[in-house]
Image (cartoon, coloured by chain):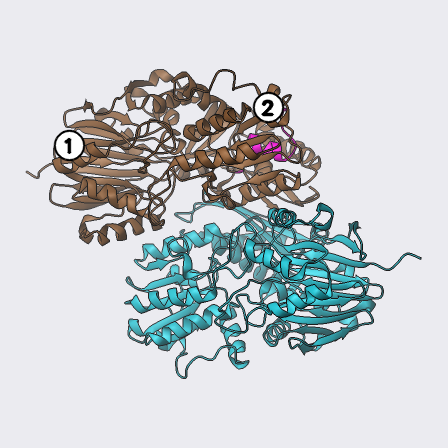
Chain colours: A brown, B cyan
Amino acid sequence: MAKPRLRIIPLGGVGEIGKSMTVYEYRNDLIVIDAGAKFPEEDLRGVDLIIPDVGYIKQRLNKLRAILLTHGHEDHIGGISFILNEFKSIAPVPIYGSELAIAYARAKLEDYSDPKLADFRVVEPRKRYRLGQHFEVEFIPVTHSIPGSYAIALKTPLGWVVHTGDYKFDPTPPLGPRTDEERLKQLGREGVLVLLSDAVRVERPGHTPSEAVVSETLDRIIGAAEGRVVLTTFASNITRIDQAIRAAHRHGRKVAISGRSMEQSTRIAQELGYLHPPDGVLVPVEIAMTLPRKQAMLLTTGSQGEATAALARIASSDHPHIRLTPGDLVIFSATPIPGNEQTVSETIDQLFRMGIKVIYPDIEPTVHVSGHASREELKHMLRLLRPRFCVPVHGEYRHLALYRELALELGYLPERVVIPELGSVLSFSREDVRREGTVDCGPVLVDFVTPTHAVLRRRDEVASSGVIIAAFVIDRETGKLIAGPEVTAEGLNGKVSAETLAKVTEEFKRFLAKQKGGFSHGYLVSRTKSVLGRQLYRRAKFRPLILPLISEL
Amino acid sequence: MAKPRLRIIPLGGVGEIGKSMTVYEYRNDLIVIDAGAKFPEEDLRGVDLIIPDVGYIKQRLNKLRAILLTHGHEDHIGGISFILNEFKSIAPVPIYGSELAIAYARAKLEDYSDPKLADFRVVEPRKRYRLGQHFEVEFIPVTHSIPGSYAIALKTPLGWVVHTGDYKFDPTPPLGPRTDEERLKQLGREGVLVLLSDAVRVERPGHTPSEAVVSETLDRIIGAAEGRVVLTTFASNITRIDQAIRAAHRHGRKVAISGRSMEQSTRIAQELGYLHPPDGVLVPVEIAMTLPRKQAMLLTTGSQGEATAALARIASSDHPHIRLTPGDLVIFSATPIPGNEQTVSETIDQLFRMGIKVIYPDIEPTVHVSGHASREELKHMLRLLRPRFCVPVHGEYRHLALYRELALELGYLPERVVIPELGSVLSFSREDVRREGTVDCGPVLVDFVTPTHAVLRRRDEVASSGVIIAAFVIDRETGKLIAGPEVTAEGLNGKVSAETLAKVTEEFKRFLAKQKGGFSHGYLVSRTKSVLGRQLYRRAKFRPLILPLISEL
């Protein structure tokens, strides 16, 4: 009889950035690490979110022992509520992670699902948890841009398997402990079969700077600012938010938080004690706007130029509470995710046009540092763990390929470094690794029909489950309609009558006629979806996927 | 009577990168500097090129004395043939510039217009040319990424006006002379009224590295390469092409050039003696492919990931002559223009998937250097010229705003530094500057109906002159059509019958049914235009603007 092998299947995160998810399977036990989501690229506008296809797991639910979370960022936990909805038959599913990651996951279940579908278990470092018959797991603290980040060590019958999650070696993390190098080294001595590594920053030589560098920069910039200061970063970048609040406090500013996701993430981080702003520093936005400008700081969402986020609305003078005036300062403490470069640029330009001073990484590199390991850190991890096999699992294809080159430079044999594709089944014994085909794992598209109700569709089901295309060409400057809108239904099998479609189109035309130009592409896409969706639902009690196809001349 | 004033009107290049064009007007004399084109951004796919609206000049053709070219890059000369077509009534129009800029402009006229519309005049440095009654012009050598680059000094009745064009202070340019700092300083002493400055690299501190740095890097990389080397850069980056050919020759490689625009630009540069490759180094592509891999280098277009360029076809294994094999090396000696980040990334990923080694600026920063001045160089120019007024004229809005901050740091008064909008009329006396409104200068869209015939449309004419929308949703991976195509005509007033449209749509459906997936967005857009355009022309003898609106799920 053949010896049992360990199967590792990345269902997301390889050849793409986002929606991290990896399956580990040995005999009758199956473990999942992370359940991430990904924001769609420009040409997928109209789709709100993309999550991994969990069909492979659904067929083996009786083997699923746990979902383990490396940390609380969207690309690692953002799919959890939709995925647990698929796993209802075995609810509650044990979910292990740091206190913060679990609190964020719980909030997601409250929004789009039901926390009862999960059996949450907060882990502690240097403890071991048994998962089924064949696995044990240990969580190893690592530094990243959110506290409560862990690498995950799975003890399998074939040896340790280490999944780094997102990490860097930050010698002076402002929040939380340093990476537990001692324990990693020990694991290396005990014998690591496979390392699954973050690879996204492999292009950069040397070491990623410490988050502490950002503290100094923020302190200097905020200290020198004469007007209001607005700082934007990812809602879940709790470390950065903590740094910003401290710098504001040192310079006599009160801080208000604007943007739903950041309000939620900071509230949770505060409840759990990760954030402890000095008494009285946090104030409501309305109060902050009444303070002398030099005493106010605002923390907002929108660092990626998202059309509906607080910052985009500020830049369009469209925010209900926040109005900036010349001399105020906006700090982008984040870099654009690939694909968002244009929307970020547009937001920066809009702010400059208002007479606002803007500071962003291109002109002040240390206003942000990456949370990911650069080349020397990736090598350091390999030297600590000395795994028999390495698999890069977080990055575009070029990052995975460059990680492989890096491992080869360190002396690894080509057959010991595997570049996976999405859905690759990598099968390990103690001696070798083979590829055993690919499981079906095309993306699943999430369509937010209402703020609390989402519909999931596999890409290959979209055509048959019905879609509405809304195509039009509009003058970017004047807002005048140049051609269209053509609103057409496909695959709806009469669920929406021609008459309804015509009426909905008329309504939509009236909406477009009111546009005055100067809008962003994202604004048009999101408004097209909401206007059409509302009309359709009202008339047909039905809401198919709506894909706006818009050209702005 | 009011004293006559000097009017300066940027018709392109401000608040955007590309299609540089500036009008200088004093009493009955009007001068134009540059006649550039711009490649459309992602959401304008379907439009081939964008050029400035020259309506303001057309109404004053009797005053037009000359078009002056700063250098031979697309964003400064790419609109010349279309624009001279508009100026036919006063042909030939005197066009001044360096030998190389003029040769490139002439080639453009041969392709899309008629060289007889221009009266070309090759200039020499330190000479003065009279233009009408009130202007004289002098061309001052500057360093950039193409030889024959000039700053332009206009002697006006109010003093010197200096238009830098694209420049940097490169102390060791591999081709051509250094920036003539002595003459610039002299102009400063003689009295400069206005400086119109490149501002696009104002975000970067310090000095832009010399092109010589790239020579060293290319020499090292090409010297170490074991397989074929492919180098991609802008077709007009003659300096880079020269560096690459020299490095190849030093290491015993022959060089072939692939891609129509690069073949043309290098042929012209060779004829004029800017490029003088050692005898026998240049070979046809077919020959290069038969050489031992270590003896071959290919120079190709496609550094921006353009879907129809040589490199994209190589990366899709779709090039008629060039097939790469694992171990070959591709060098990107260029950075993506904003908006092209995604297509460049996709091309790099595709090459890595083929087992090709890829070197690009993110992993080897000195494989490319910018041709534009960084902050200290911008300051140096200000100190040399000591202009009374400064106007940044090449950059996104944020670059213009940051240039203003830089000038204020040097002690300029706020009222002396003007940020123009597109079409701003800036009116100067010796003492002051005022804004006198804005001239109509929305973009003009160029639609290549055939490779040698283009149709121009002002944005506000598109709706009335007719447009075909082709909207569809397709599965990126499998190529399966998910929804559409909806092909609809607007504003065509019966020039295309419903029957013709239905037939054309059927043809187009057949084309789409043959797609197998794995295509790039740009490929689909360009094929949609060509398939529909051919069918329409065949059936209706008519070819309106075709705008593909495509979503890839």
Quadrant of the image containing the N terminus of chain A: top left
Prevailing SS of the magenta stretch: loop
Q: Quadrant of residue B216?
A: bottom left
Q: Quadrant of residue A74?
A: top left
Identify the magenta region: A305-321
Q: Considering only order in the chain, which callout, 1 or 2, is on the residue closer to the N terminus?
A: 1
Q: Residues within 10 Å of mark 2 (few under 14, many from 20)?
A: few
Checking the image for residue B444, the label placed there is none
**Res. A235 in view:** yes
- Taking the spot 55% from the left edge, 27% from the top edge, the residue there is A298
- Taking the spot 26% from the left edge, 21% from the top edge, the residue there is A123
Q: Which residue is mark 1?
A: A156
Chain under callout 2: A
Q: Amino acid at mark 2?
A: Arg
A427, above or below B241, in the image? above
Dots 2 and 1 on the same chain: yes
Chain under callout 1: A
Residue A234 lies, in percent from the top left, at 46, 32
Which residue occupies the foreground of this view, B537 or A67?
A67
Q: Which residue is mark 2?
A: A538
Gap between marks 2 and 1 measured at Cα? 54 Å
Circle 2/circle 1 CB separation < 8 Å: no
Mark in front: 2 vs 1: 1
- Dot 1: element: strand
Q: Residues within 10 Å of mark 1 (few under 14, many from 20)?
A: some
Which residue occupies the foreground of this view, A282 or B187?
B187
Q: Amino acid at mark 1?
A: Thr
